[in-house]
Amino acid sequence: MRIVLVGPPGAGKGTQAAYLARNLSIPHISTGDLFRANISQGTDLGVQAKAYMDAGELVPDEVTIAMAKDRMEQPDAENGFLLDGFPRNVSQAEALDAMLKAEGMTLDAVLDLEVPEDEVVKRIAGRRICRNDSSHVFHVTYSAPKTEGVCDTCGGELYQRDDDSEKTVRKRLEVYHTQTEPIIDYYRAQNLVVTISALGKVTEVTRRAMDALKKSG
Ligand code: AP5
Ligand code: ZN
């Protein structure tokens, strides 16, 4: 399956993607995680991306599309993938369509996670991430680690993302409404969008997502 996950910052895309990718046996491809890996490795791409991310703005399309394309061309993505955070504007969606078309492929679904703004703000404020692996995500109240500041999965140090400050989150939400939401209409025109509520327990949301994907397939 080829799936795009869309939703505001803090909706739980990364959290759900980890479970869905495992259930569906496809790789989870997060452009945010790819950028963060580049930042921690100190690559040129990371240096370039960090300034935009810290400001809550989108990294330029040229850089982002090339990075996403490179990742989608890896052998593990041959039979499908779950895209998280890409595409993030209409021109990225058009670039993805062109990439898939060139390979004779299409998307199967666009899963839209709906969460009220006051809830995403709470989720982001309490989020803590593992230094060793950004797919190890916790929340100080909703899914607290057994030991404060320590990852349950690997023992790594938990930290708060630089772009999770209140000011940057406000900017990220604005960018989501103005630049990313229009891709939902773009994909609606292709009859690909399934919208679910991302409120409730993580496991409940995963079940809802799996049911919606089955129906759409
Ligand atoms: P990115 O990393 O993609 O961030 P985002 O879209 O803002 O999304 P988040 O990672 O903040 O949230 P999420 O929805 O994954 O939520 P999570 O599962 O962690 O992008 C960061 C930046 O990179 C962008 O601003 C941009 O600069 C750049 N970038 C990335 N892609 C780009 C692109 N394509 N083009 C240009 N620039 C790009 O959950 C949040 C918290 O809630 C966690 O603590 C979690 O434990 C908790 N939680 C999750 N589900 C539940 C639940 N059901 N109940 C209670 N708590 C929950
Ligand atoms: Zn960890």
Image (spheres, helix red, strand yellow):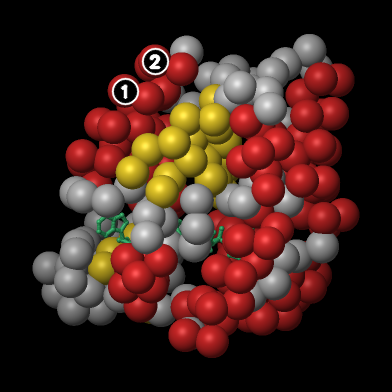
- Residue 77 point in image, percent of width and height: 61, 27
In the displayed structure image, the side of residue 193 where residue 93 appears, left or right: right
In the displayed structure image, the side of residue 46 where residue 9 appears, left or right: left
Check disc 2: other Cα within 10 Å, few if <14, some if 14-19, many if 20+.
Answer: few
Q: Type of residue at label 2?
A: Lys
- Where residue 211 is drawn, which disc sits there? 1
Instruction: Give the residue displayed 48% in from the left and 35% down from the top.
Output: 111
Residue nearest the viewer, comparing 155 with 61: 61
Residue 48 against residue 3 in the figure, above or below: below
Ligand 1 within 8 Å of the CB at mark 1:
no
Instruction: Give the residue displayed 75% in from the left and 65% down from the top.
Output: 59
- Marks 1/2 in contact by CB < 8 Å: the verdict is yes
Residue identified by numbered label 2: 215
Instruction: Give the residue displayed 77% in from the left and 54% down from the top.
Output: 64
Asked which quadrant contains residue 179, the reply is bottom right
Asked which quadrant contains residue 148, the reply is bottom left
Cα gap from disc 1 to disc 2, whole angstroms: 6 Å
- Where residue 116 is drawn, which disc sits there? none
Instruction: Give the residue displayed 65% in from the left and 67% down from the top.
Output: 175
Q: Type of residue at label 1?
A: Asp
In the displayed structure image, the side of residue 143 where residue 37 appears, left or right: right
